[in-house]
Amino acid sequence: MTETRALLLGNTPRRAPARKWPMTVLGVIFLAIMVFPVYWMINSSLQANSGAATTDWLPFHLTFAGYRAAITQQGQNLATSLIVSVSTVILTLIVATPAAYGLARFKMKGTTAFVFVLLITQMIPTIVIANALYTLFNHLGLLNSYLGLILADTSAQIPFAIILMRAFMVSIPTSLVEAALVDGANNFRAFRSIVIPISKNAIITAALFTFLGAWGDFLFALTLTSTPAVRPITLGIYNYLGANGTTEWGPVMATAVIASIPAGLLLIIAQKYIAAGALGGAIK
Amino acid sequence: MTSVTGTARRRVRVGRFLTSWAFVAPALLFVLVFFGYPIVQNVVMSLQNYTTTTFYTGEAPFVGFANYADIFSNPIFVTTVINTALFTVGSIVLQFSIGLGLALFFKRHFPLSGFLRSLLLLPWLLPLIASAAVWKWILDQGSGALNQFLAVFGVAPVPWLVSPSLALVAVIGVNIWLGIPFNTTILYSGLQAVPEELYEAASLDGAVGWRAFWHITWPSIRSVVSVVIVLGVVYTLRVVDIILGLTGGGPANSTQTLATWAYQNSFVQFAFGRGAAISNVLIAVSLIFAIVYLYMNRKEVDE
């Protein structure tokens, strides 16, 4: 009972840290359960567990055969994912950054309504969009093309990118932009030379989330492409799973690890920008 | 004089109007083409006999509500609705309870609590389909890690993903695992915002433990709670990746939800009209929750 109370309560004064170590142990146990699948992914990617009865709990028989197979079989798809995701980030930023600023700064009729619509778009299931986009793309010849996938991914990421950057840009003091306008700059120059540099952190954060969204996209890839010509890594993983009775889990797990690396790297690199971006609004 | 300034002012105003729209127009166009058009097109398609032949002949005969009649009379419809409800409610209830439990736990500030809490986000790095792959392997009946672990206690191999009576439970379990980091993080930040003085004042009045939780913590985080739950419902309704990756909706439709069934109809059976009709049912359900969410968030949108 006391333990339950201790868990639920936030009011007991801080005790000496030494008495709290049991909670750390409990925390490590919770975490171990939560993170186990990530561990298992890495562990099995390093083993030759071709359907043998058991996989070792630690990679005692270390082999990179899984990674070699993954690179040979999925290297092309990996490149496709990179092309699609990077293009999506660029296109999203080009469209979303001015829009975020426009919606933050200009009080137009319909601004509120548009932000409202952007929020609603976040709740529309992707399968609904894909269903209709397939027929549209079929007419336009955009199925099985980089452009089609990039456009679809971009459209899915734009609303969130706008919402995120607008939240920051609302806090940019109007006086900064006004000063530039008085000096003869037009709105577009003021946007380029003042708003963008100030909003760097927010833009980087939006770029990061856009990349993660595009990189992880599965449903657009599944529905809008059907040939190996344009096949992102997510679809590569899915095709492994579809091949009934997969017994070679090494390459599958190696591919899953490789597919998780960009997200990990980006998060580590962009960490300080994200933190700063989140704080930026509060400080100003 | 007055008229000159009036014209100038109007010109400035028109100019400002045009510039401001120039900033927003591309995004507006994107939203119209990629959200507006699909929603309208789905309604149109749901009233047509839209199949593969349509792509060659360009003909999609109007069939009224035949597609809707078709899906509502299909016994699978009832199955998918029940599955969708079980999947959503099961996921949300457990994600939320475990997330809240962990948030309260981490709020205790024990050694390494910050570090452990940030590690909790590790599963987020995996693309959803990669998570599905890992779990499919862990839940594998023959040599998966879970059955390997259970075998230590003498449990016979459990057919997690291949038994129609267990597959939904397994899929819900995986989805709960996916949702816990999000729930914990948001609820933790909600708990951080509860002023410490409230607890101090309450403890003077003898409100500690459960009573402090019910009278202080819960009322203070209620708005965060409702946002977490509504967003959770909306995101759970659209889940496709995990189910397709783990079971593909099977065995025997036991993990088929509205979202995966819409996919099956459109992209496996190429009955786009029926797929559109199911999509519209799904969108109607999602919109109900979307409206609830926006209603609760209306202050933020208005600001």
Image (cartoon, rainbow, N blue to C red):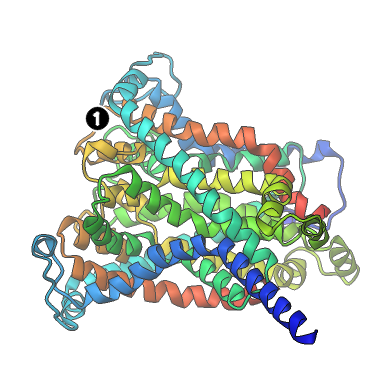
Q: Quadrant of residue B72?
A: bottom left
Front-lying residue, A167 or A43:
A167
Vertical comparison of A177 with A93: above or below: below
Spot the residue most to the bottom.
Answer: B2
Q: Is residue A215 visible?
A: yes
Horizontal side of B172 relative to A281 (left or right) equals left
Q: Residue at x 69, y 72 (%)?
A: B12
> Is the N terminus of chain A in the top left, top right, bottom left or bottom right quadrant?
bottom right
Q: Which residue is mark 1?
A: A247
Query: Chain letter of disc 1?
Result: A
Q: Is residue B183 visible?
A: no
Q: Position of residue A126 (x, y in %)?
A: 38, 60
Q: Position of residue A217 (x, y in %)?
A: 40, 47
Q: Quadrant of residue A228?
A: top left
Type of amino acid at the residue the image marks with label 1: Thr
Vertical comparison of A196 with B14: above or below: above
Q: How many marks?
A: 1
